[in-house]
């Protein structure tokens, strides 16, 4: 009997990554706001509600980029929120199940 190994999160397709981010963001305990993203949100007047909405309803339009220094895959979720197109960069790791928010911006 063979067992199928679980696929690593950093090897998922764009659609699978979107589904993973949406599912994980349903519980706010799974979302970690770095100091940098908090600073950028404050500077750019982007609310927590808008960031969470982007994670739950957004799309990955650009190819996710690996961050070899940290061993993560960085995905930019994009969504139209409060009259602006918002982008939120999320770092995903095979070792840590949380969504680590890197930055937030208007696009």
Image (cartoon, rainbow, N blue to C red):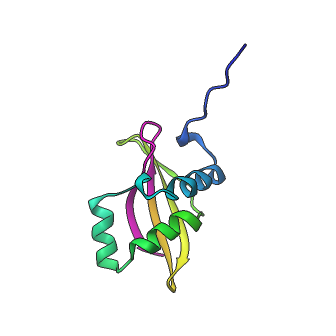
Q: Is residue 60 left or right of residue 34?
A: right
Question: Image point 52% across, 68% down: which residue?
Answer: 54
Measuring from the top left, give residue 74's x and y in whole percent.
46, 52
Q: Give coordinates of residue 45: x percent, y percent.
A: 35, 80
Residue depicted at 55% across the width and 64% down the height: 56
Q: Residue furthest bottom?
A: 83
Residue at coordinates 52% horizontally, 59% vertically from top-left? 26
Vertical placement of residue 49 versus 18, above or below:
below
Q: Which residues are magenta?
A: 90-107
Residue 60 percent coordinates (x, y): 58, 61
Task: Answer with left or right where residue 17 lies relative to residue 92.
Answer: right
Q: Principal SS element in the magenta part?
A: strand
Residue 58 in sight here: no
Q: Determine the image quadrant of residue 44.
A: bottom left
Q: In the rendered image, is residue 37 in sight?
A: yes
Q: Residue 41's image quarter?
A: bottom left
């Amino acid at each position: 009997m063979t067992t199928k190994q679980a696929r690593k999160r950093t090897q998922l397709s764009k659609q699978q990554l979107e589904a993973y981010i949406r599912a994980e963001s349903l519980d706010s305990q799974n979302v970690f706001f770095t100091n940098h993203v908090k600073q950028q949100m404050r500077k750019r007047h982007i609310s927590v509600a808008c960031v969470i909405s982007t994670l739950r309803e957004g799309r990955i339009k650009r190819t996710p980029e690996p961050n070899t220094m940290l061993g993560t895959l960085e995905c930019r979720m994009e969504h139209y929120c409060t009259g602006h197109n918002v982008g939120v960069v999320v770092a995903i790791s095979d070792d840590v199940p949380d969504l680590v928010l890197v930055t937030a911006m208007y696009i």
